[in-house]
Amino acid sequence: MVKDFFTLHTSVERFEQLDKDNIPRHVAIIMDGNGRWAQLKNQPRLFGHKAGAGAVRETILAALELGIGYLTVYSFSSENWNRPEDEVKGLMNLFVEVLAREVKNLNQMGVRVTVIGDREGLPEKTAKAFAECEKSTSHNDQLEFVVALNYGGRQDIVSAARACAREVSQGKISADDIDEALFAHQLSTVGLPDPDLVIRTSGEKRLSNFLLWESAYSEIFVTDTLWPDFNRDSLLEAVCNYQSRTRRFGGL
């Protein structure tokens, strides 16, 4: 009870300290630590992934409360296929279960779901569930919730380079026409603002092939909190830290 009171008090204090005119427009999160969280509880890794779904829900609610416009989560990387087969299969089934359970809540909250990444590599059932969720929530405008699924930053950049090369070979553009804006238009994140703040949980200090182009000038916040324990106060802490920094974008 004392811990709950302290957490609530801390959240209120942090919320009141926020500069409402300096809320990051786009927050991206590398959700790390589900497996370690489960192991600490002597549970299988999938137990941690299921608990992590609850942290996603809490983070969406907190993002809405703060007025964040875009929230991107790294849910499954293109390298995660190298994990044990039973874990990957369990994750793909978990995506389907969570979407079926949460789509009504997402609509009630005004959350629009967008998926980036290579859908062709996904199991048919998983790809269909995400496509249906995107369609069902497409009219919402309170928060764009972007799910990076079977996604890799390097792969996305290579795909964009190939798309530009095809347009050059077809005579639609010249090589000299390619600039940052044209190139970015070929990325899977086209239409999304670059993330102002990238959060990584579990204490690891690397991007792990996540939004490599888009994060060029993002502020990075690392927390030791394992993803299933990430909550409203965790996001508030990250945003408070973001507001303590001066963003120069290479200038003085």
Image (cartoon, rainbow, N blue to C red):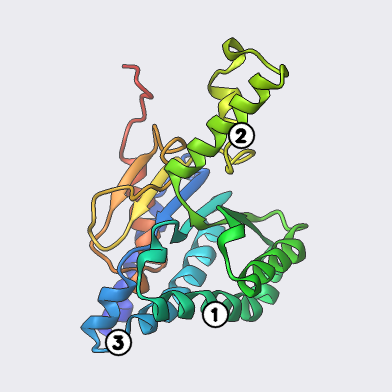
Q: Sequence-wise, which precedes: disc 3 or disc 1?
A: 3
Is 128 placed left or right of 62 in the picture? right
Q: Amino acid at mark 3?
A: Met
The span from disc 2 to disc 3 (Cα, nearest Å) is 51 Å
Q: Is 230 or 170 nearer to us in this picture?
A: 170
Q: Amino acid at mark 1?
A: Asn
Q: Residue at x 38, y 24 (%)?
A: 249
> Dividing the picture into quarters, in which one does residue 99 lie?
bottom right
Is 125 placed left or right of 197 in the picture? right
Q: Is 108 or 41 nearer to us in this picture?
A: 41
Helix, strand or loop at label 2? It is loop
Q: Amino acid at mark 2?
A: Gln
Q: Residue at x 58, y 10 (%)?
A: 176
Q: Which residue is mark 3?
A: 1
> Dividing the picture into quarters, in which one does residue 45 lie?
bottom left
The image shows residue 75 at horizontal and vertical percentages of 46, 63
Q: Which residue is mark 2?
A: 186
The image shows residue 113 at horizontal and vertical percentages of 64, 60
The span from disc 1 to disc 2 (Cα, nearest Å) is 30 Å
Q: Which residue is mark 1?
A: 93
Query: Would residue 21 be seen by someone viewing this image from the given angle?
Result: no
Q: Sequence-wise, which precedes: disc 1 or disc 2?
A: 1
The span from disc 3 to disc 1 (Cα, nearest Å) is 36 Å
Of the 4 image quadrants, the one containing the N terminus is: bottom left
Q: Residue at x 33, y 47 (%)?
A: 207
Q: Residue at x 23, y 56 (%)?
A: 204
Q: Sequence-wise, which precedes: disc 2 or disc 3?
A: 3
